[in-house]
């Protein structure tokens, strides 16, 4: 998109607003008082005859909604009037023409000015509260109407809206009488404790609590209301010019949307869209209604169509474009696609540098994909533009904690809580930070405050238990953990409960604090760990395999069949590009890769997919896109992920081989230099201490004169090479098969958790370690040996087969260990 044209359109809009402001600032004091504002409203609506109550209603709404722009002595400032037009409360071009103004006329001098750049004054808006990590803003802010007729331009439309408002009031009274529990201010319908949604002001209903009402659409009363509404729509269509019919359906849609009748609002917006297919506004509002109905995919499609219509109309919708980008980004977030959302938030911030919500959303999304420094910059800019933005402060606190600046992070979390005492995310995140630095009583207090606002927050209940355990309150910790288990029924919480009970039973909770027997454990250097038998995995190899397995679990690639993965790779359209060095390559935007992965992992919930993409971006894309261009080699990317998908070893290697054929120089076979570069990249990402450096890996082989090719059998031989290949894949497959297998009553002698997966037994002393303690070299402090010899047991059957051999070595030690484990 050309940003220059958008910037010019904004400057033109600002100049028109300035001229309108000058026309009605009769005393030249730089503000519009109620009398001057009333004159403006009447002048720009020449076809409407206002009553005094209607005028007062308009002024009350404007002065209440834009309180941050109101000077007590002067009234609404020029910046405030500009914001009303930016938010869609009026059509600046229509009003400019209605006042018969011309840009050729010399401007009058005024005392205030409009600042469109980043140095715009910070505004304390009163639309709604804010909040947290990736800003899935749940409640839209107020949108002031330019008239009681919901922005109607025609007198006939005004009457239609008044009739509709009467029908809605009647329906509401009927439903309130039928269900006394459904009252307007019910706390169950308020969500002030959560993050705001980042929607444009036109997106949502007024912040007035009286309008938060849940409609029962299955009643006879609602059916009658729908029939009467259809009669109103028929009046709109009957004998009216096309412009007036369009205005009528749009006004009815806005009125219905403001009062949360989203399904009927959508129908009105779509009728308006049929009258003007090339108009971006009906599409935009339809997307808003679909989002409110929870139909995220359809909402995204409508916003895409609105964006196409706006961009193809020149500067006609320049003021709406930033909001379309923002709402499209939020709809993409609703599907878990943060990389795509970042592109739209960034575009909105370019088009309107003062759009602090777009900057906040950009920072939140960047943090969500692991780009921490960029997130910090965007959030700081949002706070500079709006210091009272609690959501941005909360997210900045999370970013600072990630960067290791804990004291600054605590300050930002506390500022967010001061701005909004019930800010769930700020309380929860501050609790996590305090827990991480060992301030357990204070952390427990934060989690208790979270549970006051959200009693069913099982993660807060779990972390409260951890905090209490750290503070030495073992009994309270156990009770809190039991509550968390009741809420979630998660098996890992059951294991944690068993762990605490085991510690208490063995009297290892001394003085109220958890303490492993014999004062903890020792960390042994790798050279002192020996393998007993060829089948026992080495400590270092297991450590890397566990890390890869953790990445595989987070990304959920183990749920994706490798054949389906290869099929999707084959359908991907990757254009051939020519970068500056002249060598052709098939590169693809990271956001486009996200779309392909979303198809492959379509069963994942949005939150789970966000976590998957964050892991992929931090571990894989950061290496492939070390220059920060936003594009990566498509074949190399797919080849790196192929070994982590579900399937046999041979099928995974075949998928990697086929993916490398996407590179432009490869045909039915691949070039040897491509295979070498791939394997080196794979090792640099997943086995960094054994592979090439991440910064150099992309240059390996690019200038090599070797143009020989390798067949699939030759590629397999290179892949399985112990020194230069990725033989660790076979260990990863073993972990996949065992990571849910338990070993009866065996507990790890170091961490004292039940052993799941492989069990590593020290054959001279008889103690057992879980995979994680073995890979990290942790042994009980009672066994400080010169050398340790471990044998790996995969299942209980393996243990029984070898039991007699173990007893021949040290029967007493083994028996003693068995007794301890049980």
Image (spheres, rainbow, N blue to C red):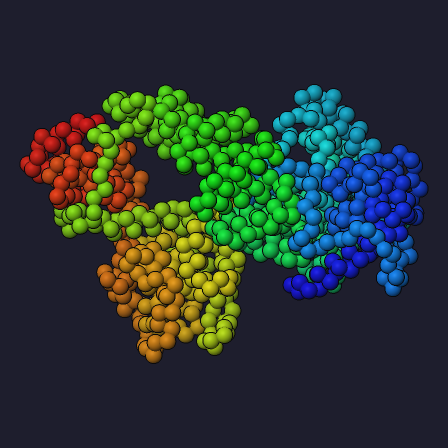
Residue at the image point whose x is 87% and y is 49% from the top: 28
Residue at the image point whose x is 17% and y is 50% from the top: 527
Please state which of residues 65 and 471 is positioned toward the viewer in this rendering.
471
Judged from this view, the residue extending furthest toward the bottom is 705
Q: Is residue 203 visible?
A: no
Please give left or right for residue 192 compared with residue 99 in the image. Answer: left
Please state which of residues 61 and 153 is positioned toward the viewer in this rendering.
61
Q: Quadrant location of residue 162?
A: top right
Q: How many marks?
A: 0
> x%, y% of residue 476?
40, 21
Q: Is residue 672 visible?
A: yes
Residue at the image point whose x is 53% and y is 57% from the top: 591
Q: Is residue 473 above or below residue 98?
A: above
Q: Quadrant location of residue 620?
A: bottom left
Please state which of residues 355 and 270 is positioned toward the viewer in this rendering.
355
Please give left or right for residue 164 compared with residue 349 in the image. Answer: right
Position of the N terminus, as image quadrant, is bottom right
> x%, y% of residue 327?
64, 49
Residue at the image point whose x is 46% and y is 44% from the top: 405
Judged from this view, the residue extending furthest toward the left is 808
Position of the C terminus, as image quadrant, is top left
Please state which of residues 674 and 468 is positioned toward the viewer in this rendering.
468
> x%, y% of residue 612?
45, 49
Please give left or right for residue 3 compared with residue 315 in the image. Answer: left
Please give left or right for residue 589 compared with residue 45 in the image. Answer: left
> x%, y% of residue 263?
70, 40
């Amino acid at each position: 998109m050309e940003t220059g044209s958008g910037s010019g359109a904004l400057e033109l809009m600002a100049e028109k607003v300035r001229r309108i402001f000058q026309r009605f600032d009769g005393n030249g004091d730089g503000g519009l008082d109620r009398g001057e504002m009333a004159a403006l409203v009447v002048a720009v609506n020449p076809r409407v005859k206002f009553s005094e109550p209607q005028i007062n209603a308009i002024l009350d709404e404007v002065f209440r909604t834009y309180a941050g722009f109101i000077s007590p002595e002067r009234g609404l400032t020029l910046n405030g009037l500009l914001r009303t037009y930016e938010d869609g409360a009026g059509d600046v071009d229509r009003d400019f023409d209605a006042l018969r103004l011309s840009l050729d006329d010399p401007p009058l001098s005024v005392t205030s000015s409009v600042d469109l750049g980043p140095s715009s004054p910070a505004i304390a808006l009163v639309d709604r509260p804010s909040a947290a990590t990736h800003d899935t803003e749940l409640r839209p802010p107020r949108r002031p109407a330019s008239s009681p007729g919901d922005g109607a331009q025609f007198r006939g439309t005004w009457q239609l809206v008044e009739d509709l408002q009467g029908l809605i009031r009647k329906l509401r009274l009927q439903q309130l009488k039928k269900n006394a529990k459904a009252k307007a201010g019910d706390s169950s319908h308020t969500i002030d404790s959560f993050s705001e949604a980042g929607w444009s002001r036109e997106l949502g209903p007024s912040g007035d609590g009286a309008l938060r009402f849940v409609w029962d659409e299955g009643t006879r009363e609602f059916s009658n209301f729908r029939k009467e509404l259809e009669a109103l729509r028929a009046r709109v269509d009957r004998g009216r010019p096309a412009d007036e019919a369009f205005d009528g359906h749009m006004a009815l849609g806005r009125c219905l949307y403001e009062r949360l009748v989203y399904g009927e609002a959508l129908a009105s917006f779509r009728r308006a869209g049929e009258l003007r297919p090339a108009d971006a506004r009906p599409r935009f509002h339809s997307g808003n209604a679909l989002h409110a109905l929870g139909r995220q995919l359809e909402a995204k499609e409508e916003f895409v169509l609105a964006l196409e219509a706006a961009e193809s109309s020149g500067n006609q919708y320049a003021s709406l474009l930033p909001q379309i980008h923002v709402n499209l980004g939020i709809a993409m977030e609703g599907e878990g696609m943060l990389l795509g959302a970042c592109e739209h938030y960034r575009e909105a911030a370019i088009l309107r540098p003062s759009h602090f919500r777009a900057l906040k959303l950009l920072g939140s999304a960047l943090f969500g994909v692991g780009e921490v420094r960029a997130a910090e910059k965007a959030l700081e800019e949002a706070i500079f533009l709006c210091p009272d933005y609690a959501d941005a402060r909360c997210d900045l606190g999370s970013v600072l904690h990630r960067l290791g600046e804990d004291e600054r992070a605590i300050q930002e979390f506390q500022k967010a809580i001061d701005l909004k005492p019930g800010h769930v995310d700020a309380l929860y995140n501050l609790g996590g930070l305090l827990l991480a630095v060992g301030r357990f009583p204070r952390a427990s207090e934060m989690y208790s405050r979270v549970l006051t606002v959200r009693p069913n927050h099982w993660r807060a209940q779990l972390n409260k238990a951890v905090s209490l355990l750290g503070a030495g309150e073992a009994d309270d910790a156990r009770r809190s953990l039991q509550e968390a288990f009741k809420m979630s029924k998660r098996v890992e919480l059951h294991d944690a409960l068993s762990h605490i009970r085991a510690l208490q039973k063995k009297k290892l909770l001394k003085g109220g604090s958890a303490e492993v027997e014999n004062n903890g454990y020792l960390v042994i250097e790798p050279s002192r760990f020996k393998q007993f038998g060829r089948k026992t995995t080495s400590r270092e190899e297991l450590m890397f395999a566990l890390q890869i397995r953790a990445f595989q679990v987070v990304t959920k690639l183990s749920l994706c069949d490798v054949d389906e993965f290869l099929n999707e790779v084959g359908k991907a359209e990757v254009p051939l590009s020519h970068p500056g060095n002249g060598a052709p390559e098939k590169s693809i935007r990271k956001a486009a890769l996200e779309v392909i992965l979303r198809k492959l992992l379509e069963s994942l919930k949005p939150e789970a997919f966000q976590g998957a993409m964050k892991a992929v971006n931090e571990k894989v894309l950061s290496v492939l896109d070390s220059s920060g261009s936003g594009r990566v080699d498509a074949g190399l990317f797919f080849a790196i992920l192929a070994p982590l998908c579900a399937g046999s070893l041979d099928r995974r290697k075949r998928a990697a081989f086929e993916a490398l054929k996407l590179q432009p120089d490869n045909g039915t076979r691949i070039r040897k230099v491509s295979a070498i570069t791939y394997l080196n990249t794979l090792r640099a990402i997943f086995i960094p201490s054994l592979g090439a450096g991440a910064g150099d890996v992309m240059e390996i082989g690019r200038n090599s004169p070797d143009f020989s090719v390798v067949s699939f059998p030759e590629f397999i031989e290179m892949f399985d090479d112990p020194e230069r290949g990725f033989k660790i894949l076979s260990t990863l497959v073993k972990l996949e098969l065992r990571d849910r297998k338990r070993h009866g009553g065996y507990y790890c002698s170091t961490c004292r958790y039940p052993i799941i997966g492989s069990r590593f037994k020290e054959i001279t002393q008889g103690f057992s370690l879980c995979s994680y303690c073995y890979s990290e070299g942790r042994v009980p402090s009672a066994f400080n040996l010169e050398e340790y010899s471990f044998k790996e047991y995969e299942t209980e059957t393996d243990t029984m087969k070898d039991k007699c051999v173990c007893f021949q070595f040290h029967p007493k030690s083994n028996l003693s260990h068995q007794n301890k484990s049980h």
